[in-house]
Image: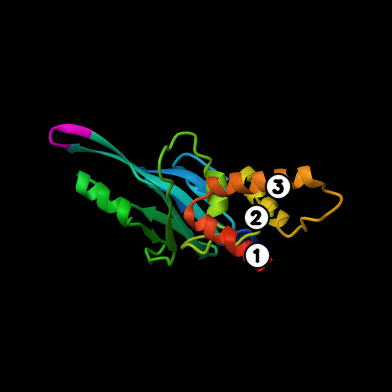
């Protein structure tokens, strides 16, 4: 009888442990060594460690980092920022990138990144892929603000979230400026001087935005 009770108790404990693990299960994502994290769900990130994510939709931004021999000299390669979005639950995911061994391969990757995402059973996982590209000077980029602006558009892998839920200075100002357009120019409380400042703010943020964000900006104004 004691032995039966011990076996039953052990089985019950295992069942409870399994139930508990299942209830609190999430999504893990292993990043390859030739990658560098930039953002996770719009927030600043770094490193190549395994990520622990909530179930559901997640957005990851990263770069390819690598080196290869080209005509006898070693070349460092850093790709544009790649954005992927996937919707998974209780899964162990692994992201893989190809080997790059030449300038042509590097250029081809930047134009059309090859990214593989698989689950713990080596099954391909469906995901959307986009690029976070900024032309011109790359120093001092605010990736969080760029991603927040990207997510206001309908580009591939954009995350459908409320801008107010992310603390992004540029986006907050952009949204605030957009909202300000709906305020009547004859509002007595604001005064003429403040209206001029709003116009300057609108012009400033419009000039800072990329083409896709400008289109979204214009559409918001037209919809008011």
Q: Which mark is residue 198?
A: 3
Of the numbered discs 2 and 1, the one sitting upstream in the chain is 1
In the displayed structure, 43 sits above or below 181; it is above
Q: Nearer the viewer, mark 2 or mark 1?
A: 2
Task: Answer left or right for 149 relative to 123.
Answer: right
Label 3–label 2 contact, CB within 8 A:
no
Q: Counting residues from the N terminus, which is met first, the one under dot 3 or under dot 2?
A: 2
Please tell me whether mark 3 sits on a helix, a strand or a loop: helix
Q: Which residue is mark 2?
A: 163
Report, in whole angstroms, how far the alpha carbon at label 3 lies from the one at label 2.
Answer: 20 Å
Nearest to the observer: residue 115 or residue 152: 152
* Residue on which the image places disc 1: 12
Q: Which residue is at a point 13% across and 32% down the rendered structure image?
A: 72
- The quadrant of the picture occupied by the N terminus is bottom right
Q: Residue 164 location in percent, x, y? A: 69, 53
Local SS, label 2: helix
Q: Is residue 109 visible?
A: yes
Look at the image and give the residue range highlighted in magenta: 70-74
Name which of mark 3 and mark 1 comes first in the sequence. Answer: 1
Task: State the image coordinates of residue 15 (x, y, percent, origin top left).
Answer: 62, 65
State which quarter of the image contains the C terminus: bottom right
């Amino acid at each position: 009888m004691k032995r039966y009770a011990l076996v039953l108790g052990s089985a019950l404990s295992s069942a409870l442990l399994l139930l508990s693990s299942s209830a609190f299960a999430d999504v893990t994502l292993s990043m390859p060594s030739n990658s560098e994290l930039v953002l996770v769900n719009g927030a600043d990130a770094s490193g190549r460690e395994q990520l622990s994510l909530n179930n559901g939709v997640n957005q990851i931004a990263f770069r390819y980092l690598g080196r290869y021999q080209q005509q006898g000299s070693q070349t460092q390669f850093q790709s544009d920022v790649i954005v992927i979005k996937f919707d998974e639950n209780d899964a162990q995911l692994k992201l893989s990138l190809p080997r790059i061994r030449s300038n042509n391969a590097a250029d081809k990757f930047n134009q059309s990144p090859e990214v593989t995402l698989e689950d713990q059973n080596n099954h391909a996982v469906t995901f959307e892929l986009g690029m976070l590209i900024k032309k011109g000077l790359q120093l001092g980029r605010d990736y969080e603000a760029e991603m927040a602006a990207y997510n206001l558009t309908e580009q591939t892998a954009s995350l459908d979230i409320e801008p107010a839920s992310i603390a992004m200075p540029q986006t907050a100002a952009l949204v605030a400026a957009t909202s300000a357009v709906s305020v009547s120019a004859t509002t007595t409380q604001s005064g003429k001087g403040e209206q001029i400042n709003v116009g300057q703010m609108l012009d400033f943020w419009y000039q800072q935005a990329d083409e896709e964000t400008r289109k979204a900006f214009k559409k918001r104004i037209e919809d008011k």
